[in-house]
Image: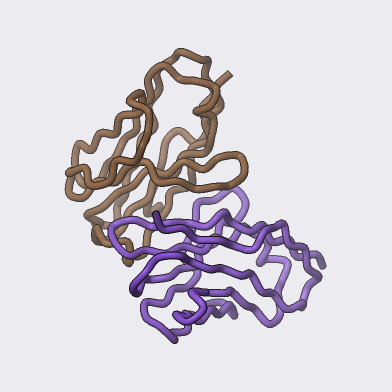
Amino acid sequence: DTAVSQTPKYLVTQMGNDKSIKCEQNLGHDTMYWYKQDSKKFLKIMFSYNNKELIINETVPNRFSPKSPDKAHLNLHINSLELGDSAVYFCASSQGRQGAYEQYFGPGTRLTVT
Amino acid sequence: GDSVTQMEGPVTLSEEAFLTINCTYTATGYPSLFWYVQYPGEGLQLLLKATKADDKGSNKGFEATYRKETTSFHLEKGSVQVSDSAVYFCAETSGSRLTFGEGTQLTVNP
């Protein structure tokens, strides 16, 4: 069974569109994250939720909105997509909200905006 | 803010060569330190970690020692294999978030 799953794996869309990426974890973890990895492999945290409560909200455009319907799911909605949004987006989860807990990553969603 | 600096890549080695990837951090106090590995087409996975000074993390033949005096956590492996080809990320945390280094691409040739 996949511990952290993301859908879709690939997403190709045009500028200006709105899209969502879904993430689910079956590890029973309390904390989930969204990361963005750029073309140079640099990884930057975007958001983190603990038990459905937003605990990390980095400097990310308002076009990005996370939603956590329950502690096993954390979705990412992106409005008015721009070329610079092209990247690989990773979802992750951990047992607790402290960074010292191991984070388990999903396989990533490669977003290409044309 | 806190930052993590890794040795620039890419690094290309022959099988059975010795590997070192340098990592230094800026966080004060006693952050926890990690190495994560990303195999091609996959997400990151934890390779090893250390939570206090002089601790040595180890896994799959890789080792790293938490050096408070030099604020370093260098990754080493005595004999690399082709299957070790991946991107390696050093990371630190002293709170609720991980701060990653830039990643180092390692390619091991047969």
**How many numbered marks, from 0 up?**
0
Q: Residue furthest bottom?
A: B54
Q: Residue at x 29, y 52 (%)?
A: A26
Residue A33 on image: x %, y %:
33, 47
Residue B16 on image: x %, y %:
76, 78
- The image quadrant of residue B33 is bottom left
The hue of chain B in the figure is purple
Residue B58 appears in view: no
- The image quadrant of residue B74 is bottom right
Figure chain in brown: A
Q: Residue at x 37, y 28 (%)?
A: A61
Residue B79 on image: x %, y %:
71, 80
Q: Residue at x 20, y 36 (%)?
A: A69
Query: Which quadrant, please, contains the C terminus of chain A?
Result: top right
Residue A87 on image: x %, y %:
53, 35
The one of B62 and B53 positioned closer to us in this rendering: B53
Query: Which quadrant, please, contains the N terminus of chain A?
Result: bottom left
Examine the rendered structure and indicate whether residue B77 appears above or below residue A85.
below
The one of A109 and A37 positioned closer to us in this rendering: A37
